[in-house]
Image (spheres, helix red, strand yellow):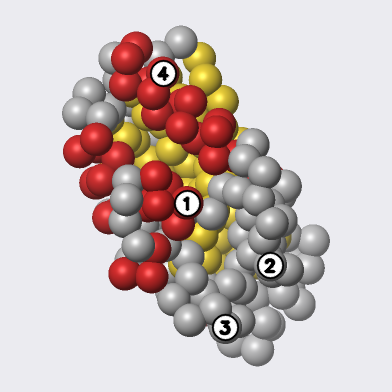
Amino acid sequence: MNEEYSNIPHIFAMSNISNYTIMANYFLSKYVVEGNKQDIDSFYEMMMRLKNADRQLEPGHFGNTWLGFILEEFGEDPEEYMCQGQWYDLTRDGDVLRFKAETAWEPCHQIRWMIEDKYPSLKFYYIGENDADEIFQKKDKAGKYFPENYYLNLFGGDFMPEIEVMKRFVTKEDAYKYVSELTGKSITNDEEFKALQNEWDEGGGGACYLAEYD
């Protein structure tokens, strides 16, 4: 389990479109937002107001940090958008905000674009993963906040049941070195990593893959 997301209340089951239960493959992400003091103040105050609102919500609802409430703040109808998900762990350090999000399948880009339109100075950086659908994305080409370029998923299965790792790396070489240290096998190139994949895939119930962020 990725420790960065271990505190998520996994209630990812409410469809904002038709109000029926649907289990989605979720995209876990971390965000950093920069901007001038005026826009950061306004955006932060809006998020905190939504979080602390006194609402009567149906059982199974995401809660006050449902992304649809941001759309309603902008005068939009949530049923017209894909906004299945929630944000959490919002913190502020000067004119920089940080938070995490859990969304269906991939990031909710339309909501981010609306926020950027309303607060022109805000700049969003993010990194995140949806393992089930093999979607790995980041918005930080210079690596200012998220220098990692590779995502490693290791599950030892019957071969090494004690191994269950989801971890980010700056370089492929760093990832291979980590796998070598963890498994005791020499992994220095793509061919050796592929050999480990094949070994774990063939009847051992393991998983071993390294993905590059888009």
User: On residue 41, which mark appears?
Assistant: 4
Distance CA(mark 3)–CA(mark 1): 18 Å
Q: Amino acid at mark 2?
A: Glu
Q: Amino acid at mark 1?
A: Phe
Residue, disc 3 = 20
Judge the density around disc 2: few (<14), some (14-19), many (≥20) Cα neighbours within 10 Å. few
Against 8, residue 31 (above or below) is: above
Find residue 50 and report its horizontal and vertical position in percent.
Answer: 54, 40
Mark toward the viewer: 2 or 3 = 2
Judge the density around disc 3: few (<14), some (14-19), many (≥20) Cα neighbours within 10 Å. few
User: On residue 164, which mark appears?
Assistant: none
Distance CA(mark 2)–CA(mark 3): 12 Å
Whether pointer 3 and pointer 1 mark residues with C-beta atoms closer than 8 Å, the reply is: no
Q: Residue at x 68, y 82 (%)?
A: 204
Locate residue 102 relative to residue 6 in the image: left or right.
Answer: left
The first of marks 4 and 1 along the sequence is 4
Tell me the element at label 4: helix
Q: Is residue 48 visible?
A: yes
Tell me the element at label 1: helix
Q: Is residue 177 visible?
A: no
Q: Name the quarter where the C terminus is drawn.
A: bottom left
Distance CA(mark 4)–CA(mark 1): 18 Å
Against 176, residue 93 (above or below) is: above
Tell me the element at label 2: loop
